[in-house]
Image: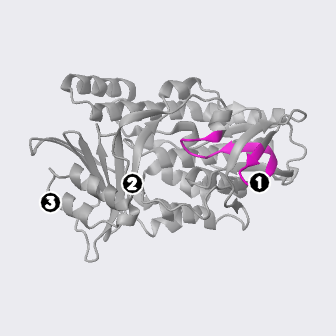
Amino acid sequence: MEEIGIVIVGGGIAGLATSLALHRKGIKSVVLERAEKERSEGAGIGTLTNGWRALDQLGVSDRLRLTSNLIHKARTMLIEDGKKKREFVLNIKDEARCIRRNDLVEALADALPDGTIRFNSQIVSIQEDETTSFPIVHLSNGNTIKAKVLIGCDGANSIVSDYLRLGPIKAFACRAVRGFTNYPNGHGFPHELLRMKTGNVLVGRLPLNDNQVFWFVVHMQDSQHNGKDQKSIANVTLKWVDKLSEDWKEMVKRCDVESLTLTHLRYRSPWEIMFGKFRRGTVTVAGDAMHVMGPFLGQGGSAALEDAVVLARCLARKLGPDHGDLLKDCSVKSIGEAIDEYVSERRMRLVGLSTQTYLTGRSLQTQSMVVRIMFIVLLVLLFGRDQIHHTKYDCGRL
């Protein structure tokens, strides 16, 4: 049986960011990724001030700024019977950009030491060592690993969160398609986040640069289409935007079909984040495994980056680089205390984000004006009139 100090399950944003944050603190970790290579997904990540603060701490922000333009405005329009009924405009004073998920994953992976990521490493079960109380990870290839610390960054369908006995995640009654469209001669769109809600469809677009646009289409009541292949996803999306203007239809028609992803939007309820037990022994979670949320605030990716910085900082206080790669002198008690500090620091931040995301999603999903007003009133009562105050959060220094 192999022994490793810190094992991180999942080579997505949360897993790689956590490993890099630990590396910046002089602590080695191993990332177990089930795929054969770095995961490639057609998604853009709207990253606001809080996300860039975390990226600054991880040391990859300057590289990412080179491929993404600043976003100066956020505009939301409500359309009824083909006519604009309401429009809300927000001028963005702080840093906001859209970055490709692939660019972020590559930047994080490139900054890690060689050999940190182990591909084709899918975990199937976790058990607690009866003698030491440390976790033992069983892989699909028959190998086993004993870890001093196990961090689950394995997404919404997390095996690690199951081990923690967290409740099942819930689903919104809607699906979302995300994709990219390239305009060789320039798209001509303003550098703003534009969201439009008409009927059961919410659409949005966010330029990455002068030639490429990230866009999404959410159908609020359609949870049936599974999208067997890229072409069928494109056809479903064209059906959803059929009543929109020609520039939206053209954007979907001209898209990079291989970039399309169709997902059923899911979330972990705010009350579970409030009361959930995110540590069992020396095992914890981060990213979507901890707090998967809908895309309505655009904070899922940034929250995962914040997790990484805070978790690495808390572990470093108790462990430090002097204990060696295997953390030989570190006890279950000291590691548990570090994880408890991490959970305590993150909990209320995540409760706020998940609550605001949930209420915003419900307000967009409902067809009842009375119910929509009720959700809006709740949002104002809970979060004030500054509905983007959450972007001013600072996760602190590593």
Q: Is residue 320 visible?
A: no
Residue of label 2: 228
| Residue 7 shown left or right of residue 326 in the figure | left
Residue depicted at 47% across the width and 45% down the height: 300
> Could you tell me which secondary element the residue under label 2 belongs to?
loop
- Mark 3 is surrounded, within 10 Å at the Cα level, by few (under 14), some (14 to 19) or many (20 or more) other residues, namely few
> Could you tell me which secondary element the residue under label 1 belongs to?
loop
Residue depicted at 57% across the width and 31% down the height: 347
Q: Position of residue 396 (x, y in %)?
A: 59, 45
| Residue 13 shown left or right of residue 78 in the figure | right
| Mark 1 or mark 2, whichever is nearer to me | 2
The dot on residue 246 is 3
Q: Position of residue 360 (x, y in %)?
A: 34, 34
| Spatial CA span between label 3 and label 2 | 26 Å
- Mark 1 is surrounded, within 10 Å at the Cα level, by few (under 14), some (14 to 19) or many (20 or more) other residues, namely many
Q: Position of residue 82 (x, y in %)?
A: 9, 45
- Residue type, label 2: Lys
Residue 81: quarter of image: top left
- Residue type, label 1: Ile
Magenta stretch? 137-159
Residue depicted at 28% across the width and 35% down the height: 364
Of residues 75 and 164, the one nearer the viewer is 164
